[in-house]
């Protein structure tokens, strides 16, 4: 499907965010990718003239307004908002740094709330779609030892998805979520693992996944794109799991 949708994607400098930006752009959308570092964003946009970059910390003061204003300046509308940016910090409860707890909640919960609030007028005008990127580990069926705070923030995001879907339906805004399983995005290395440790982690998980492998960012991105299309108009308040059936084992 070819579309000229105007799309905002946070955390667009790597992994699922980068793959989603390119997937939408390949299908004709105009995309604003947001992230804290210019180099990864520039790499995301390389070869894609319809991807615009914005260096911004989404937890910063007035960040929501800055992001939405830039999208409106570039595109004149906001059709899709993808709350993808997230921070995860591994560690047992006994070892948690209070700052690490704060950063995870500010990035993974508070920032999406405030950004979505700033985008409401534009999304109402377009009858737009919000896609919240959660995690299959936070579906309420599995524990997340050593990663409990991250899982808690993603469970909160799923709850926001359901509540906003009901609250915003009268504005013709849809709110859906996607819950990826383990996807090879390099996130473990960015969270402090060595490359060898991360590869070992992926191999360990792959054995447990019924389909026999971990996911690819492009596979999740494709579903994000599908969720945001007009022919998915009756899908609302749903969190779609994309994890190779791991969560139902």
Image: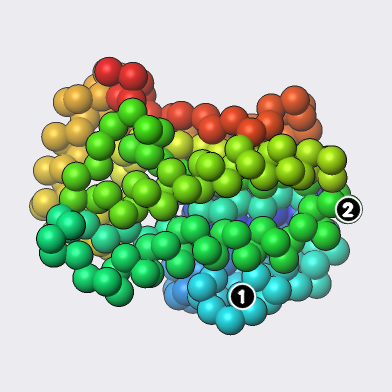
Circle 2/circle 1 CB separation < 8 Å: no
Viewed as shown, does residue 79 lie left or right of 226?
right
Viewed as shown, does residue 102 lie left or right of 125?
left
In this figure, which residue is indicated by the disc labeled 2?
125
Above or below residue 131? Residue 114 is below
Q: Write the residue at 30% across / 24% down.
A: 246
Quarter of the figure that contains the C terminus: top left
> Which of 6 and 60 lies nearest the eye of the viewer?
60
Q: Position of residue 29 (x, y in %)?
A: 72, 49
Q: Could you tell me which secondary element the residue under label 2 belongs to?
A: helix
Quarter of the figure that contains the N terminus: top right
Q: According to the image, what is the colour scheme of the structure? A: rainbow
Above or below residue 181? Residue 160 is below
> Which of 2 and 83 lies nearest the eye of the viewer?
83
Q: Position of residue 130 (x, y in %)?
A: 67, 46
Q: Position of residue 213 (x, y in %)?
A: 26, 28
CA–CA distance between discs 2 and 1?
21 Å
Q: Write the residue at 20% across / 40% down.
A: 202
Q: Residue furthest right?
A: 125
Q: Write the residue at 51% across / 73% down.
A: 59
> Which of 192 and 3 lies nearest the eye of the viewer?
192
Q: Which mark is residue 63?
A: 1
Q: Write the residue at 68% across / 31% down.
A: 236
Viewed as shown, does residue 63 lie left or right of 39?
right
Residue 79 visible somewhere in the drawing: yes
């Amino acid at each position: 499907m070819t579309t000229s949708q105007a799309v905002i994607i946070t955390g667009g400098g790597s992994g699922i965010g980068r793959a989603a930006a390119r997937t939408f752009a390949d299908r004709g959308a105009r995309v604003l990718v947001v992230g804290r570092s210019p180099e990864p964003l520039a790499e995301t946009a390389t070869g894609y003239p319809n991807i615009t970059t914005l260096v911004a910390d989404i937890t910063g003061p007035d960040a929501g307004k800055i992001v939405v204003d830039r999208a409106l300046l570039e595109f004149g509308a906001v059709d899709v908002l993808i709350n993808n940016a997230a921070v995860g910090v591994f560690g047992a409860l006994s070892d948690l740094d209070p700052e690490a707890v704060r950063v995870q909640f500010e990035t993974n919960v508070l920032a999406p709330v405030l950004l979505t609030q700033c985008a409401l007028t534009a999304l109402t005008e377009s009858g737009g779609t919000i896609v919240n990127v959660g995690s299959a580990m936070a579906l309420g069926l599995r524990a997340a030892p050593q990663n409990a705070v991250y899982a808690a923030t993603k469970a909160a995001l799923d709850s926001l998805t359901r509540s906003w879907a009901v609250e915003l339906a009268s504005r013709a805004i849809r709110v859906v979520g996607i819950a990826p399983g383990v996807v090879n995005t390099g996130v473990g290395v960015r969270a402090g693992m060595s490359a060898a440790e991360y590869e070992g982690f992926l191999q360990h998980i792959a054995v447990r996944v019924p389909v026999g492998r971990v996911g690819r960012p492009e596979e999740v991105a494709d579903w994000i794109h599908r969720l945001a299309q007009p022919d998915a108009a009756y899908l609302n308040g749903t969190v779609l799991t994309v994890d190779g059936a791991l969560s139902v084992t």
